[in-house]
Image (tube, grey):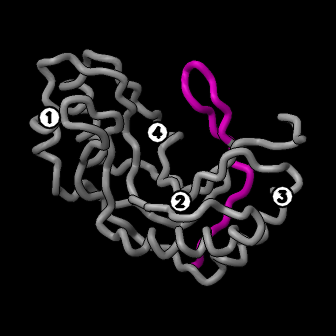
Amino acid sequence: MESKEDSIRTFIAIPAPLSGQLQAARDQLKQRIFTGRVRWISEPQLHFTLLFIGETPVALLKPVASALREALGEVSAATLTYKGIGVFGPPHAPRVLWAGIAEKEILHDIQQRVTGALDPILALPGSNHFKPHLTLARIKSLPENVRMKEVIAPYYENELGEMVLDRVRLYRSELHPQGARYTVLEEIFLGW
C-alpha cells in the first residue's frame, strides 16, 4: 500500500492569463455577484485542465513528464480567443462560473494527445467528456435575488480577448482550507 509521501495529487493543464477584456468582464461580474459564497480563482491559478490525474505515484512523475514532452513535441503554439461566459450546475444553484474558448478543436487535439500518451503509464479510467473551459469562480451559494442567467447574458457569446497557448504544464495540487495550491512540476513549451 502506498503512503501519502509515495504519491501526490496531479493534473495536466494549460496556463491561462486573462486578456484585458476577460479581466474587465470578470471585474464587472464580481461587482454584480458580491454577495453569496463565491470563491474567485486568482489569476496565477487560472488554467484549462486537460487531464486531472489525481493521486500519482512519485516514481511515475519522470515517465509522465517524458511522455508529455514526446506527445506534445509536434504541437505548435497558437493564439486562442476567449469566447462566452457560462455556468455549470442547475440554473437556480450554479456551482462553477467559466469562460469558454472559440478554438475548442485545438484543446481537444492536445487533450487527446495527452490522454493517449499517459494511458499506458497511468491506466486512465475510461470515458472522459472533455469540456474546455476556464473556471473563473466556484460558487457555494448565491442570494435568491441573483439570477445567473441574467448576470452572464451580456457575455454569453461575446469574444473576450485572446491568449497565447505556448505551454502545457504538469501541476501538483495540494488541498487547503483556502483552496487548492498549485505547483508547476514540469513545463512543456510548444513550438512556433
Q: Nearer the viewer, residue 163 or 84?
A: 84
Q: Secondary structure at mark 1?
A: helix
Q: What amino acid type is highlighted by mark number 4?
A: Glu
Q: Earlier in the sequence, mark 2 or mark 4?
A: 4
Q: What amino acid type is highlighted by mark number 2?
A: Leu
Image marks 3 and 1: residues in contact by CB distance under 8 Å: no
At a point 44% along the width and 61% down the height, the residue shown is 130
Could you tell me how far apart the alpha carbons at marks 3 and 2 are, in whole angstroms? 18 Å
The residue wearing badge 2 is: 50
- Please state which of the two labelled residues, at mark 3 or mark 1, is closer to the viewer: 3
Does 60 appear above or below 5? below
Image marks 3 and 2: residues in contact by CB distance under 8 Å: no
Q: Earlier in the sequence, mark 4 or mark 1?
A: 4
At label 4, counting other C-alpha atoms closer than 10 Å, the crowd grade (few under 14, some 14-19, many 20 or more) is few
Could you tell me how far apart the alpha carbons at marks 1 and 2 are, in whole angstroms? 28 Å
Left-right relation of 51 to 38: right
In magenta, the rendered stretch is 173-192
Q: Secondary structure at mark 4?
A: helix
Q: Position of residue 158 (x, y in %)?
A: 17, 56
- Please state which of the two labelled residues, at mark 2 or mark 4, is closer to the viewer: 2
Label drawn at residue 60 = 3
Does 114 appear above or below 158? below
The residue wearing badge 1 is: 151
Q: Earlier in the sequence, mark 3 or mark 2?
A: 2
